[in-house]
Amino acid sequence: MPKIPILLDGDPGHDDAIAWMLAAASPELEILCVTSVGGNQSIDKTTYNALRIMALLGIQAPMGRGGPRPLLSPAMTAPSVHGESGLDGPALPEPLQEPEALSAPALMARVIAQAREPVTLVPTGPLTNVAALLLAHPELKGRIKGISLMGGGIAHGNWTPAAEFNILADPEAADIVFRSGIPITMAGLDVTEQALLFPADFERIRAVGGPVAQVVADWLEFFYQFHRSMGYPGAPIHDAVAVAWLTHPELFSGRDMYVSVETAGRYCRGSTIGDPRGRLGMPANAHVLLGVDREGFARLLTQAVGCWKEG
Ligand code: BDR
Ligand code: CA
């Protein structure tokens, strides 16, 4: 089977790191490049984390560093969720490579232009880099087959009552992406808060053995502690849903609809408004994931860490 060429763009972050682990382990996927974006932590920290994750997983691809801030908003971070480093928990190897001289959007543009076929973008942080890419290179839209993103929530938010973190961190960027006309699969909170891993799952992952299994189990444990304090029954592995959808769509249910992004509003800035009944008269711009086979998702992640078992 030919592999699906993907670009990973994220703000790692525990669940970004687990998403990239799943991508690296998936024989169906080919990672063409990795880019960092500010979000869970500053761009310095997410870039360093991205390079350390690539070293851990043996991802061999060019890496591009994102800019220091969102398109218009001031930068916001999430140390309460991911710690001061943005990826607190187990020790990680030091980077084996430097970021490219090109910025993240410029590297994405080069990779997309040179790819043998249209590519799929997998953004798991604020959409700053993707929007900057689309603004600078509208001619490349036809070379982007789709965007499988983690962000938003039709029913509710997690950072405000209405807004999810990735969209709230850069609503103007999200608005550009959702209006781009590129087919989007939205892994928002509606599905990702069902994509829970529980302590019994962490132990199954640890028991697989090998260096990556240990690190992933420790990441899960760290991520769980925060979510447990917030009343979640498990750790929602949000970002891994955007990867799992590409290789195992049968694990998910969803619905096509028009999704708009609120960029103003006293209470609703950064919210994603779904229109399943077509009230706005707009054609669907997103396939919104709404349900997941949790057991199947947990099994997929458990099998994935086995990839590094032999060292
Ligand atoms: C999203 O916010 C970040 O903290 C996670 O990495 C995920 O991408 C969930 O709202
Ligand atoms: Ca993320």
Image: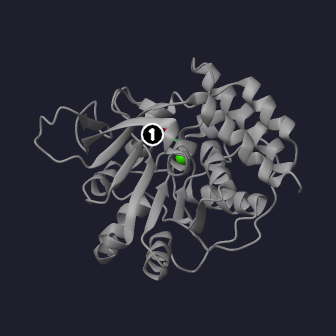
- The image position of residue 27, as x and y in percent, is 65, 59
Point out the image quarter for the N terminus.
Answer: bottom right
Report x, y in % for residue 256. Answer: 29, 41
Q: Is residue 252 left or right of residue 30?
A: left
Q: Residue at position x 60%, y 59% from top? A: 28
Q: How many marks?
A: 1
Identify which residue is drawn at 66% across, 41% down.
300
Closest to the observer: 133 or 161?
Answer: 133
Residue 136, image x, y percentages: 33, 74
Q: Which residue is mark 1?
A: 165
| Above or below, 253 relative to 284 | above
SS assignment at label 1: helix
Q: Is residue 160 above or below residue 140?
A: above
The vertical placement of 21 against 241, above or below, is: below
Quarter of the image containing the C terminus? Answer: bottom right
Q: Nearer the viewer, residue 268 or 10?
A: 10
Viewer-side residue, 22 vs 99? 22
Instruction: Give the residue type that dot 1 points to.
Output: Phe
Residue 162 placement (x, y as % from top left): 34, 30
Does any atom of ligand 1 lie closer than 8 Å to the CB of label 1?
A: yes
Res. 232 image quadrant: top right
Label 1: few (<14), some (14–19) or many (≥20) C-alpha neighbours in 10 Å:
many
Q: Quadrant of residue 15?
A: top right
Decide if residue 162 is in sight here: yes
